[in-house]
């Protein structure tokens, strides 16, 4: 289980840095280790914090990080995260999975429609002050991220590209910075409520940190087309998993065999 945790952490760090929903890999491992859903959710934040420290520094090294924009957009996201983290203290897992699954389907449609908007962004919309629309949008995303980490990167990317005007690669860099700030706040809330197992979280982080480093360098070198391909694949797989399609296929296969 320890080796599985490190391996799952690497996949999580790679997927989260390029797109999002990497926690859908680590959360099942944490649950398999015997942690309750809410404790697994809190424990997972340790690895998320550490992977995003690595991701942020890697994007900064590549000179692709808009610090001012990221810090400004972090403010409403952090406020929403506080609200969401308190909601998540009494987590209803079936409702959570159905809600995320439905949102993923909507996200897939938006990614497939008008791909150039995702690849090129809208540089004229990127500015250095917050609009009311951005405050509302990123506060809502923050509530979701505080509630459950899985999928937050995908929704932040949508907000950064479709709402704030970044292209996918630079939006990814800002996304990593925002999630770092948001995850620190959420981890504090879970930790103060005794819903974090620090040793297991550190174990998962042994995988997420190198995964984030590899992903950040791949995003910078391969560009927006590659990132969009990963994003589509992640959204499709996440949607199928959250709606129980993989579990259904596994059950049918077990009956056949």
Image: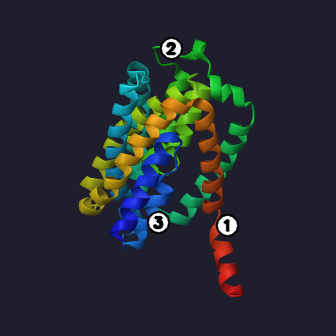
Distance of mark 3 from mark 2, alpha carbons?
39 Å
Q: Quadrant of the C terminus?
A: bottom right
Quadrant for residue 113, please give it: top right
Which numbered mark, 3 or 2, is in the foreground of this view?
3
Please name whichever residue, 191 or 256, is drawn nearer the observer in this view of the structure: 256
Residue 77 disc label: none
Question: Would you say 97 lies left or right of 27 here?
Answer: right
Tag 3 near tag 2, CB within 8 Å? no
Kindly identify the residue that appears in the image at 48 percent across and 59 percent down.
25
Residue 200, visible in the rendered structure: yes
Residue 53, percent across and down?
A: 32, 38
Neighbor class of circle 2 (other Cα within 10 Å; few <14, some 14-19, many 20+) is: few
Please name whichever residue, 124 or 16, is drawn nearer the observer in this view of the structure: 16
Residue 127 disc label: 2
Q: Is residue 100 above or below residue 107?
A: below
Q: Which residue is mark 3?
A: 28
Residue 97, percent across and down?
A: 57, 60
Kindly identify the residue that appears in the image at 55 percent across and 23 percent down.
166
Distance of mark 1 from mark 3, alpha carbons?
15 Å
Kindly identify the residue that appears in the image at 28 percent across and 47 percent down.
188
In terms of secondary structure, where does tag 2 sit? Answer: loop
Q: Which residue is mark 1?
A: 245
Q: Is residue 246 above or below residue 215?
A: below
Q: Quadrant of the N terminus?
A: bottom left
Residue 29, percent across and down?
A: 43, 66
Distance of mark 2 from mark 1, alpha carbons?
42 Å
Q: Is residue 36 above or below residue 11?
A: below
Upstream in sequence: badge 2 or badge 1 = 2
Q: Is residue 30 above or below residue 101?
A: below
Please name whichever residue, 257 or 44, is drawn nearer the observer in this view of the structure: 257
In terms of secondary structure, where does tag 1 sit? Answer: helix
State how many labels appear: 3
């Amino acid at each position: 289980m320890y080796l599985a945790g490190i391996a799952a952490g690497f996949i999580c760090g790679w997927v989260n840095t390029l797109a999002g929903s990497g926690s859908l890999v680590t959360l099942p491992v944490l649950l398999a280790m015997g942690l309750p859903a809410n404790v697994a959710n809190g424990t997972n934040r340790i690895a998320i914090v550490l992977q995003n420290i690595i991701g942020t520094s890697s994007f900064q090294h590549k000179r692709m990080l808009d610090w001012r924009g990221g810090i400004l957009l972090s403010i409403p996201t952090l406020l929403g995260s506080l609200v969401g983290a308190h909601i998540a203290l009494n987590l209803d897992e079936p409702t959570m999975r159905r809600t995320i699954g439905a949102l993923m389907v909507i996200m897939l449609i938006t990614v497939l429609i008008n791909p150039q908007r995702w690849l090129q962004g809208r540089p004229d919309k990127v500015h250095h002050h917050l609009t009311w629309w951005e405050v509302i949008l990123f506060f809502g995303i923050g509530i979701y991220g505080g509630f459950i980490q899985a999928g937050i990167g995908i929704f932040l990317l949508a907000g950064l590209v479709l709402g704030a005007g970044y292209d996918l690669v630079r939006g990814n860099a800002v996304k990593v910075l925002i999630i770092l700030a948001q995850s620190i706040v959420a981890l504090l809330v879970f930790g103060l409520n005794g819903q974090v197992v620090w040793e297991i979280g550190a174990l998962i982080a042994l995988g997420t940190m190198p995964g984030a480093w590899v992903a950040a360098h791949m995003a910078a070198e391969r560009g927006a087309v590659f990132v969009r391909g990963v994003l589509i694949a992640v959204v499709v797989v996440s949607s199928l998993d959250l709606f129980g399609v993989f579990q259904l296929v596994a059950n049918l296969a077990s009956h056949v065999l």
